[in-house]
Image (cartoon, coloured by chain):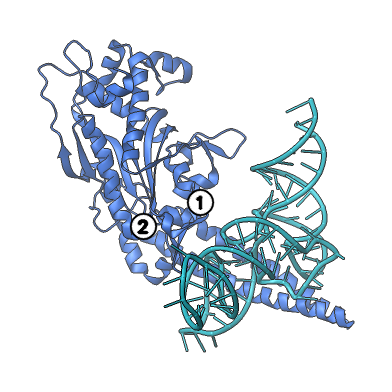
Chain colours: A blue, B cyan
Amino acid sequence: MIDLKLVQKDFDEVSRKLMRKGVDAEMLESLKEANEELKKAKASFETLQALQNSMSKEFGQYKREGKDISELKARVDANKIVIAEALDIQRQKQEALEKLAMAIPNMPDDEVPDGENEDDNVELKKVLSPREFSFQPKEHWELAQENGWIDFERGAKLSGSRFSVSYDMGAKLERALINFMLNFNAKRGFHEVSVPHMVNRTALEGTGQLPKFENDLYKIEGQDMFMIPTAEVPLTNLFQDEIIPYEDLPIKMTGYTSCYRKEAGAAGRDTRGMIRQHQFHKVELVCVTKSETSDTIFNEMVECASDILTALELPHRLVQLCTGDLGFGAAKTVDIEVWLPGQNQYREISSISNTRDFQARRAKIRYKDGKKNTFVNTLNGSALAVGRTLVAIMENNQNEDGSIDIPKVLKPYLEM
RNA sequence: GGACGAGUGGGUGAGCUGGCUGAAACCACAUCCCUGCUAAGGAUGCGUACGGGUAACUGUACCGAGAGUUCGAAUCUCUCCUCGUCCA
């Protein structure tokens, strides 16, 4: 959530930053106005309430002293009606403000390049060069089916499009990758955490998926519960409404979960294969830290994800997202894109974001900084999306006869 | 699924026959004093959020969540959630 005090104190700066992200000035004006109105409404309610409280005290006094209370009671009753009205107004203003504030995205860091969409993202660096093929490399779904690893038809039969079933080495590789990644992350100091795959509304509001993106989530019927779209949600909300001891920071976590997404906005995109599925495996990194160290941690996370790909010998590049491609809660994001020779392009396999205190403010995650409580910074990133890693292994390690070489680092996990 | 019991500040835990309780006490923590040695003792401070004030200070809200009764609720009523224990 946006810092309302900052909006009030430094409106021009906030609007300058948010306009880069496409928030129009009008919306900010109405936010500012809503905030002012709420303050006024609160002030008048509180004045009335203070009066009511003091009269109530007097009331008790009178009774103890056995004085006549009829006159006082009349005054108190009259005030009660006025208060009810004032409270009602205050509530309306509160609601209006919250609705506005919750819908405003995070401010991008100044270093984030301006841009409309993913075409304006900036490549930071390439790691490993794509291999030269002496034959026409195939796309992963072909390879997957040829090798009997993945069954898209039966996935569709069971659950519809964008679902698949894995067999034998396909299934084993998924499992190996999850273990490999978790261990890799653990060696970099990320503690492994296993979390629920369903969460309540509060958690999703905390990380920013709600209220804006309810259409992308699978909701449990009859309950206020949702399947998680990413482990970021439970991992970050672990600390929701907590004051974390100073010495516990930074908290570095890694966790594996399946992720569940409706992909409502992606109709027609990546319909074949396992690039975009409704349910996919992902190993996630989440960090909670002080603002002073959040940039350092951010770089550690990017490096960790990139190094996993390097260990798997997969060519990839780091891309800094422009303002137009930045997610709702992110102040800054670096994507890692893996080379897919079958598709002849780089595709996203990890996205690492610093949300600064945006999520912390929503989820009320703080630490004690000397005397006062301060919002933490939260960061999240994939390390990595398992399905897409499998895709990358298939496409990059394919041989002319359709067989696929297993990366060396995975062999111990496959008992090979 | 049924029957009880519980949910209080960073922690333990009083209050729960409605006003003097935003909340005792203890622990933890912070600062200071004393002392000087692998100890201890003493003083003071110490919940959160939002608002007013240069400041001292002050207003409002919050005792699992929401609603209600009342001039007034942590304390009474209802609903829900969570956690225990017993039964099935």
Q: Is residue B72 above or below residue A182?
A: below
The kind of residue on which mark 2 rests is Asp
- Residue A268 appears in view: no
- Residue A79 appears in view: yes
Q: Earlier in the sequence, mark 1 or mark 2?
A: 2
Q: Secondary structure at mark 1?
A: loop
In the picture, residue A54 is in which quadrant? bottom right
Chain name for mark 2: A
Q: Residues within 10 Å of mark 1 (few under 14, many from 20)?
A: many
Asked whether, in this view, residue A195 is left or right of residue A10, the answer is: right
Disc 2: which residue: A24
Chain name for mark 1: A
Task: Identify which residue is drawn at 17% across, 19% down.
Answer: A137
| Image quadrant where one finds the N terminus of chain A | bottom left
The kind of residue on which mark 1 rests is Gln
* Residue B82 place in picture, x, y as percent: 64, 43
In the picture, residue A144 is in which quadrant? top left
Q: Secondary structure at mark 2?
A: loop
The answer to whether dots 1 and 2 both sit on one chain is: yes
Which numbered circle lies on residue A240? 1
Task: Identify which residue is drawn at 51% across, 57% down.
Answer: A98
* Residue A69 place in picture, x, y as percent: 86, 80
